[in-house]
Image (cartoon, rainbow, N blue to C red):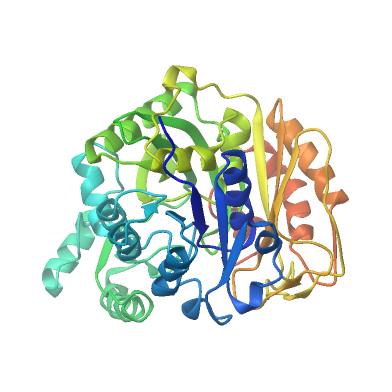
Amino acid sequence: MKRRIRKLVIANRGEIALRILRACRQLDILTVALHSEADHEAKYVRLADESVCIGPPTARDSYLNMAAVIAAAEVTDANAIHPGYGFLSENADFAEQVKESNFIFVGPDPETIRIMGDKITAITTMQDMGVPCIPGSNGQIPQSVDDLATLANQIGYPLLLKASGGGGGKGMRKVLHEQDLFEAVKLTSKEALAAFGNDALYMERYLDSPRHIEIQVLADQHGNVLHLGDRDCSIQRRYQKVIEESPAPGISDQQRSEIGRICVNACEQMQYKGVGTFEFLFQDGQFYFIEMNTRIQVEHPVTELVTGIDLVQEQILIADGHMLDFDQQDISFAGHAVECRINAEDPETFIPSPGQITRIHIPGGPGVRVDSHAYTNYSVPPFYDSLIGKVITHGRSRKEAIARMSGALQEMQVEGIKTNIPMHQSILQNQEFLQGQCDIHFLKNQFDFD
């Protein structure tokens, strides 16, 4: 099939911008790096075929400015836009505007993004498709006080209130007793409206010790869908992932195959296109759907290392109309991979640590991969997420992958700013982590990282 994408706009920043640029180079696609005034000296800006400044440092005036992104694509004569993750990547209105402006959007259809972006709609959609969900309100909570109390008692305490438009742990509140319910609804609704412009809430049973397991899917425009196994993302702080690994420890091949089949079936029913991730809570041998991310994930490298499949390249090829040239039986899982997110922050207080990196040494060796846009004398800006890179290791076993990660973190040196490397080193030495199957409360319980 003749390729349509000839020049692609990278509508993002940081390590994912560099990752997309590298994928485009291997596909012989020209690149346009968009950047704010704060990112004008970024590595990916220098390496791209072209670059366009789209606004001031603040994200709302640059990376979240839809009109500026589309205008940059027009003036550079590009014909495709890749949103990366974060920013506009799951904004259905943006995807719609990209398509209406006759550009190829590297991602699913706008309506799919819209459905999955609303947690209530996403859950009801998945329930209709046979995906297991946490017992809950099955939609927006009732307005009537009596109906609300009755439903809460049917679900059972403790329960969790969630904002329909929320994500990343925002807009959530645990409710222990009925006497706390109505005040909690009032507060969470107010917070949801302020944060997401949508005060709709739903509620579900609170699981006390779940693991966070996700399933990677890949679907082309010709009806072919497959899954690429699972990832364990349970090591997280305030619902923000810290360490991810693949495959998830303690998940049997039968469980992996069954939940993968369920996710593939759901994608087939909704005619999904592109890469996507089904996120589940896993407790007592049961999977419970929580959300679907309609974009590339930060943790995608661990899946790439155990499957040998370049997810970003496949994502671009799918958007270009190409058919997957492998099927489910061709997918094999080799060894184990672990990823540590390296952030510019104080390892004890978690306060961001922007500033100039006076020296950085990137680790290497067998089974070690580093995805980072940072370099010596690079200035980490204070306006965005503090992620400066990801260290990913691969081994024949989980033990070997962790040992390689421990060595890589000892070798990695970042001077001039603080990083969370010491926190990662402490986690890697923890016996509960080494045994696997940590739940999402691990960091709080073991390290008091609230």
Instruction: For the C terminus, give its image quadrant.
Output: bottom right
Residue 368 sits in quarter:
top right
On the image, the x and y values in percent for residue 201 come to 26, 68
On the image, the x and y values in percent for residue 330 come to 48, 18
Residue in the picture at 65% in, 72% down: 39
On the image, the x and y values in percent for residue 342 come to 70, 58
> In the depicted view, which residue is nearer to us: 281 or 445?
281
Q: Is residue 279 above or below residue 98?
A: above
Side of 104 relative to 22 (left or right): left
> How many numbered discs sit on the rendered protein?
0
Answer whether residue 214 is visible to the viewer in this image.
no
Q: Is residue 151 above or below residue 278?
A: below
Residue in the picture at 72% in, 51% down: 427
> In the depicted view, which residue is nearer to us: 140 or 270?
270
Residue 389 sits in quarter:
bottom right
Instruction: For the N terminus, give its image quadrant.
Output: top left
Answer whether residue 319 is visible to the viewer in this image.
yes
> In the depicted view, which residue is nearer to us: 432 or 297?
297
Residue in the picture at 26% in, 39% down: 271
> In the depicted view, which residue is nearer to us: 246 or 57?
57
Q: In this view, does 130 lie above or below 111?
A: above
Residue 128 sits in quarter:
top left
Residue in the picture at 11% in, 73% down: 144
On the image, the x and y values in percent for residue 423 come to 74, 59
Residue furthest to the top: 329
Side of 402 relative to 303 (left or right): right
